[in-house]
Amino acid sequence: MNDPRRLSVLLLPLLLAPGCSQGLLPELNRVLRDPAVSSPQVSSLDREYRIEISWEADPAAEQYALERAEDAMAGGYAEIYRGSDTSYSDTDCQDQGRYLFRLTKTRGNRVFGPSGAVLGVGSATCKDELEPNDSEQQATELAYDRRANLSYYRATPSLYPGRELQDTDWYWLDIPPHRIASLLITQVGLPPGSEYTFLYFYQKGTTPLHVINNQLIAVPNPSPETRRIFFKLYLNPADFIVEPTLGGGTLVDYTLSLYSILSM
């Protein structure tokens, strides 16, 4: 009875009977279709020392098994959940700890997966209240001084290539014609004038600029009309993960201010 082809032959007379096909067809499709192998969704830095993992319900699966591995640690994956729920909260995580999650589905004695791994990060610090502002479409208006944070994490490339989390903060402001705005960006914990910030500034159509701590950045508008300027702040991992073969990451607090708007 485990052979789907045999099952379809046995059910065919029932499907042809009046009134039976409407109720049996969805159930038959569920039985005959294999569960789809898909990676879970992982949300980090939303709550202290907590990583949220979820996945789509699959009618063809009877159970889900969630596995976790610590980046660059021996021992590989260990199962942390098995059941029929479609979400799991991982509270057994350390500050700055990097974890890989993958999902397996079961039906009867058959196993489907595991899925590809997804990176999650435990942290004592949460995302700032301006999130989500990771795209130009979600940019935050620089109407007053902002305090926020940026993060970047990646798993060990040789073990989990391409698994990374990167936060980017987009902002916008309107600059009147023939005026120049001056922005002040400060990485918390560093003295003014320090060149050892991890922050980078990018305005559309310009070259990325490494931020010097608490030093003014000029944003001109030479046009005869008011222009809405979009720019972003981000971290360059090469500044704090010195070896390209290593995993790692950091979270940086910063402040952003509109210092002045003056005539050009």
Image (cartoon, grey):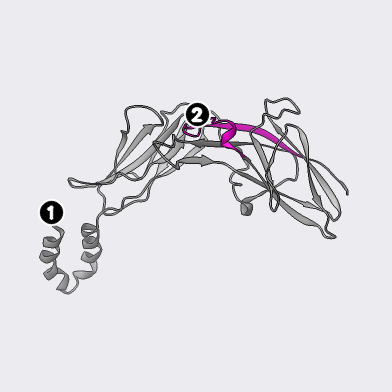
> Can you tell which quarter of the image residue 78 is in?
top left
Residue 199, given in percent of the width and then of the height, sits at 65, 36
Contact (CB < 8 A) between labels 1 and 2? no
> Can you tell which quarter of the image residue 7 is in?
bottom left
Mark 1 residue type:
Asn
Badge 2: residue crowd in 10 Å (few <14, some 14–19, many ≥20): some
Q: Nearer the viewer, mark 1 or mark 2?
A: 2
Mark 2 residue type:
Gln
Q: Kindly identify the residue that appears in the image at 45 percent across and 32 percent down.
A: 98
Residue 150, given in percent of the width and then of the height, sits at 60, 37
Relative height, residue 174 to residue 79 (above, below)? below
Q: Kindly identify the residue that appears in the image at 63 percent across and 52 percent down.
A: 136
Badge 1: residue crowd in 10 Å (few <14, some 14–19, many ≥20): few
Q: Which residue is mark 2?
A: 96
Range drawn in magenta: 235-258
For residue 264, side relative to residue 42 (left or right): right
Tell me how far mark 1 sits from mark 2, CA to CA: 46 Å
N-terminal label among 1 and 2:
1
For residue 85, side relative to residue 24 (left or right): right
Is 250 part of what is drawn in magenta? Answer: yes
Q: Secondary structure at mark 2?
A: loop
Q: Which residue is mark 1?
A: 2
For residue 143, side relative to residue 45 (left or right): right
